[in-house]
Amino acid sequence: EDYDGMVEIVDNRRVSVTQYQSVIDALELVKMGKNAKEIKDFLPKNWQILYEVEGDLNNDNLNDIALIIENTDSGNIKKNDSFGPETLNLNERIILVLFQEKDGSYTLKSKNDKGFIESENSEINPELSDPLEDGGMNIVNNTLRIKFNYWSSAGTWYTSTREYVFRYQNNQFELIGFEENSYHRASGEMITYSYNLSTGKIKIVTGENMFDDNESKPEVEWKEKVIEPKPILDKYLAN
């Protein structure tokens, strides 16, 4: 049966796990290669768009779209009795990548519903801020770049950012680059990992200072690690 790209689920008011599965089941109706005229046709009912970026991801000179969407189920807003905010938003987030066709319609080419895009808050680490707050997503040089920022109000002096770079190749979005930068919020001590998965080269820089260039005495170490097959966006897990 042809659903014309239209996917909706009813508000079944069940427990969160069941409602989440309903959303996943709904998304399964939009199989890879399914076309729709408008972006909203890929959005399950009661979900919202958090991020939307445009750019050419497959070198066809058409503007493709990447979306980060979030469930808005009030049942997933929990009271927090620990460090951090008074309430925790535990609603699930999903990333969708849509290719634009010559007729202006869109085709779903990739989705990750595995928890790679983490919820705004975490029950395990409620003191963590939203990883997307100072992170985000963009399209640069035909690559999709997703950045997370990890800042904690308690439990550690360190804060870090992680950026993942995916490129559409071999008919899928493969991870070709990863960078993590962390620093101590008191001393300014920094360490940076840069991993080029295309070459297998890992660059590790230590000795830099976030707050004072005069204190920086960078040291560079190189390592090598080849990963084949490369991780793909559809199956990538959190952390």
Image: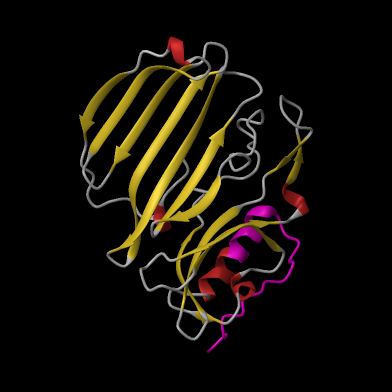
Residue drawn at x 55%, y 36% is 149
Residue 224 position in % (x across, y down): 20, 34
Q: Main secondary structure of the magenta part?
A: loop
Q: Is residue 20 magenta?
A: yes
Extent of the magenta region: 1-23
Q: Nearer the viewer, residue 229 or 140?
A: 140
Q: Nearer the viewer, residue 27 or 62?
A: 62
Q: Is residue 188 magenta?
A: no
**Quarter of the picture holding the C terminus:** top left
Q: Report the number of numbered marks.
A: 0
Q: Residue furthest bottom?
A: 1
Q: Establish if 54 lies above or below 154.
A: below
Q: Establish if 186 lies above or below 111.
A: above
Residue drawn at x 22%, y 41% is 200
Residue 210 position in % (x across, y down): 50, 20
Q: Quadrant of residue 9?
A: bottom right
